[in-house]
């Protein structure tokens, strides 16, 4: 089992425990760090996520290490985020801004885990028929 799958399994247990108490999701924190992975074993890609929340609506942007596309000047890709949070459910679409010749969109679905000031989210992403996993935690 890869580290990514082991982390997802551990967090799934935490989610089950937190949802058993019926806790509502807290306001989303603005700064996150995370990574997304591929099912074919390629290395995970690190990202920085900045979020704004207005009720259930999420907006923001992602800066990620560039691993595909035309070489960008600083080795990063950038994307806009638009989505929602509903209790422990998180959903958003990441649309690349054209950096590195990339302007496609990727859908993300996941689960938000909260415990006081601690926040973590994880789930799956989809681009056409390609599917992978992702996670993010609050940046200190």
Image (cartoon, rainbow, N blue to C red):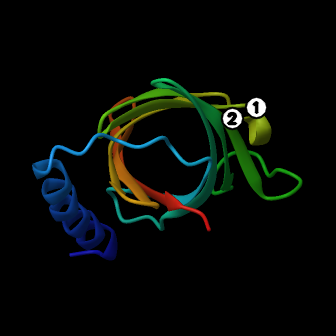
Question: Under tag 1, what secondary structure?
Answer: loop
Q: Is residue 35 left or right of residue 41?
A: right
Find residue 61 and report its horizontal and vertical position in percent.
67, 39
Please identify the quadrant where the C terminus is shown.
Answer: bottom right
Q: Which quarter of the figure has residue 124?
A: top left
Question: Under tag 2, what secondary structure?
Answer: loop
Q: Is residue 14 left or right of residue 52?
A: left
Q: Which residue is mark 1?
A: 98
Q: Which quarter of the figure has residue 25?
A: top left
Q: CA distance from mark 2 to mark 1?
A: 5 Å
Check if mark 2's residue and mark 1's residue have beta carbons within 8 Å: yes
Q: Which quarter of the figure has residue 59?
A: top right
Give the answer, above or below, for where 64 lies relative to 95. Answer: below
User: Between residues 84 and 45, which one lies in front from this camera angle?
Assistant: 84
Specify the farthest residue to the left: 20
Give the answer, above or below, for where 50 lies relative to 40. Answer: above
Find residue 83 and report its horizontal and vertical position in percent.
49, 26
Disc ID at residue 102: 2
User: Between residues 70 and 13, which one lies in front from this camera angle?
Assistant: 13
User: Between residues 132 and 8, which one lies in front from this camera angle?
Assistant: 8
Give the answer, above or below, for where 84 lies relative to 78. Answer: above
Q: Residue at 76% x, 42% y: name it.
A: 100
Crowd around label 1: few <14 · some 14–19 · many ≥20 (10 Å): few
User: Between residues 73 and 6, which one lies in front from this camera angle?
Assistant: 6
């Amino acid at each position: 089992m890869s580290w990514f799958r082991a982390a997802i399994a551990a967090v799934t247990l935490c989610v089950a425990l937190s949802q058993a108490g019926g806790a509502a999701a807290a306001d989303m924190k603005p700064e996150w760090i995370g990574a997304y992975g591929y099912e074919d074993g390629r290395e995970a890609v690190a990202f920085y996520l900045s979020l704004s929340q207005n009720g259930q609506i999420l907006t923001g942007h992602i800066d990620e290490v560039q691993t595909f596309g035309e070489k960008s000047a600083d080795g990063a890709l950038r994307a806009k985020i638009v989505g929602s949070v509903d209790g422990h459910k998180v959903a958003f679409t990441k649309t690349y801004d054209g950096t590195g010749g990339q302007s496609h969109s990727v859908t993300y679905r996941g689960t938000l885990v909260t415990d006081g000031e601690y926040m973590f989210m994880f789930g799956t992403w989809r681009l056409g028929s390609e599917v992978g996993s992702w996670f993010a935690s609050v940046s200190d």
